[in-house]
Image (spheres, helix red, strand yellow):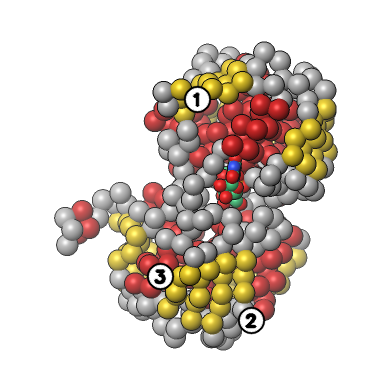
Amino acid sequence: MDTFSIRGGTPLYGELHIQGAKNAALPILAATVLAGGSYTLYDVPHLLDIEVMLKILTSLGVQCEHKNSTVHVDTSNLTSCYVPHDLMGQMRSSIFLMGPMLARCGEIILSRPGGCAIGERRINLHYKGLEALGATIIEEEGYIRCQAAQLKGNSIFLDYPSVGATENIMMAAVRAEGETIIYNAAREPEIIDLQNFLNQLGARIRGAGTDTIVISGTQHLYPAEYRIIPDRIVTGTMILASAITKGEVTLTNVEPKHLISLLDLTSQSGVEIESTHDIMKVKTKRNYRAIDRIVTAPYPGFPTDMQAQMMAFLSLAEGCSIMKETVFEGRFRHVTELNRLGADIQIDLNTAFIRGVSKLSGTTVEATDLRAGAALILAGLAAEGETRVTGAHHIDRGYDAIEHQLASLGARITRLTNDPLLSTGI
Ligand code: UD1
């Protein structure tokens, strides 16, 4: 169990290359089982979640290699359709194997997925979509057995635009007989990336990025090379890291149009951001202002994955901000920890009231999930004295060596491996 130690108060300066998107890479890795053969994927970040996905693929018989930011996988020979329980429990995205394995092998056995503790995280819409395509899904003795002799296209309405369900259904429908239409589909940029990847294999999908996606099934799929899009949540986190320290940072390998809601809000608060093509310059000269009201929502709304980091940022703004979380019901566990650093945040049901304070003071806090951990790192970068953020493994699920990324911008952050002080409880 690693811990990050941060000595705050240093403005960040310099240039940072943003990693490829975790949430695009995970479904794309799962989709490589759709057509047997050899794939090369570029800009795949080194993250715990990616490691787990590669271990799951390996357990199914896939050959995997991850060097630098390039993944080679060979899915020619699948030897199993059973996802080991311990790997399933480590990451929610293991559920992405359902659609592609059903499409390729007609069967997959897995268990309920793990992942961040941010809410109930149901999978009923994944089931609804796959069953509409002809799959039989039976849960027994902790296992989920999915089978389908032949998937058949259908019209599917999603009660909520679930990102994962949209992706799972897209991957299954690619090899189904006939046409599938997903109504009320999620519109996230990662869905467009999955469409682009699948179409590169020979799939016939249109509409990703809108709420209606049409997939015409085909059996003619071939492996391909593909570059993953930049990670918009890491970009957003680094924008706020620059802003909360009142630094001046240039971010490269970014896609500004994926961050419209965040860019709008940060500019309202007084952060200067100049964007050109795939570069962003973030400058914060003086104290920044609170933001009246932010509501998390499916894309293009404000991302729930930026809620915790935004709260850390607003805890030092001038004035009071209100943040409402509508996507995940249990996503406020960072609030207690931010308050331990001196923030003034009150919660009422799914709404947080953030009264800006003039300073935060370092202490030991616990990362309870991935983005909560990122928020605590941001707070630590601005806090006086030393902040220790325990639970580094949560942060490693989504940020590729965050301590190196931030240290390259001048932050005083180090990783304490098995911190003896903490492990003895001192
Ligand atoms: C994906 C992202 C995650 C992000 C989330 C919302 C990946 C790997 N993860 O997660 O980082 O926070 O989108 O932007 O891409 N729901 C149901 N039934 C379902 C599925 C979802 O009720 O079958 C509900 C969930 O409980 C949640 C909401 O829908 O309240 C959003 O979930 P969803 O969009 O599915 O998120 P994920 O795909 O899990």
Q: Nearer the viewer, residue 354 or 142?
A: 142
For label 3, the residue is: 338
Depicted 267 relative to depicted 67: above or below: below
Lateral position of residue 425 relative to residue 362, left or right: left
Q: Earlier in the sequence, mark 2 or mark 3?
A: 2
Q: Position of residue 293 (x, y in %)?
A: 62, 74
Pointer 1 residue: 139
Binning the other alpha carbons within 10 Å of mark 2 as few (below 14), some (14 to 19) or many (20 upward) gives some
Figure check: 67 above or below 2: above
Q: Is residue 157 visible?
A: yes
Tell me which numbered mark, 1 or 2, is placed earlier along the sequence: 1
Depth order, front residue of 309/1: 309
Residue under the point 61% across and 31% down: 127
Q: Is residue 344 left or right of residue 64?
A: left
Q: Is residue 36 visible?
A: no
Q: Position of residue 105 (x, y in %)?
A: 62, 16
Whole-angstrom CA distance, mark 3 to mark 1, is 40 Å
What's under tag 1, amino acid-wise? Glu
Find the distance from the CA under tag 2 to the CA under tag 3: 22 Å
Which element is circle 1 on?
A: strand
- Residue 41's label in the rendered image is none
Residue at numbered disc 2: 270
How far across and down, in percent of the image, does residue 359 sit? 41, 82
Relative side of 312 to 416, left or right: right
Q: Position of residue 171 (x, y in %)?
A: 69, 30
